[in-house]
Image: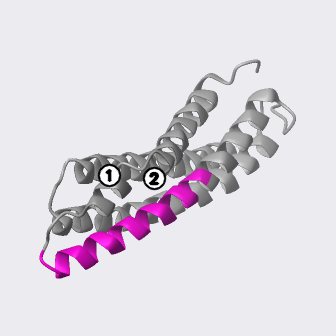
Amino acid sequence: MSKYETLLFLHVTGAFLLLGGSVTAAVLNVSALRRERPSEIALLLGLVRFAVYAIYAGVLLTIVFGLWLVRASPWGYGYGDAWVVAALVLWVYANAVGGLGGRREDETRRLAESLAAEGDALSAELHARMRDPVTLALEYSGGAAIVAILALMIWKPGA
């Protein structure tokens, strides 16, 4: 196996971790949106933390080995190529909005845990937080950015 193939393997592994963790987190979030009991919401949002470990590993592997791949490319890809620049911008964006959305979601999880301990009754505040348009926009736009990065990596427009 060549150096380039090894780097590609590690980069693609990171992409699978990033995408898999993101899809898992999205499924858990959508499942939590459909629940009424704070204990169920807290459980599902708490499980997102495990998906975040895969996302973190994917983020690290994709950036490190992705940048290394550009440098080691036998096809002459460069850091100034439009698809590389676009992917990097989207990568930064996805990480920024994912972090912001994650912090907001963590506050919602803590509220759900508190309500679960106090009788497990849904409150208007928890209901509103679960459907907060800012949090949902942050999380969904971050997911869309990850899908766009994947498309750029596969098709490499302009390369």
> Which secondary structure lies at badge 1?
helix
Q: Which image quarter holds the C terminus?
A: top right
Camera-side residue of 46 and 87? 46
> What residue is drawn where x is 51% and y is 56%?
101
Mark 1 or 2, closer to the camera: 1
Q: Which residues are magenta?
A: 97-119
- Toward the right, the furthest residue is 80
Residue 23, how many percent across, how many down?
37, 45
Q: In terms of image quadrants, where is residue 130?
A: bottom left
How far is mark 1 from mark 2, CA to CA? Answer: 18 Å
Q: Earlier in the sequence, mark 1 or mark 2?
A: 2
Identify the residue position indicated by label 1 in the image: 29
> Which secondary structure lies at badge 2?
helix
Camera-side residue of 13 and 86? 86
Identify the residue position indicated by label 2 in the image: 17
> What residue is drawn where x is 62% and y is 32%?
153
Residue 100, how many percent across, how many down?
57, 59
Left or right: 108 as drawn, with respect to 44: right
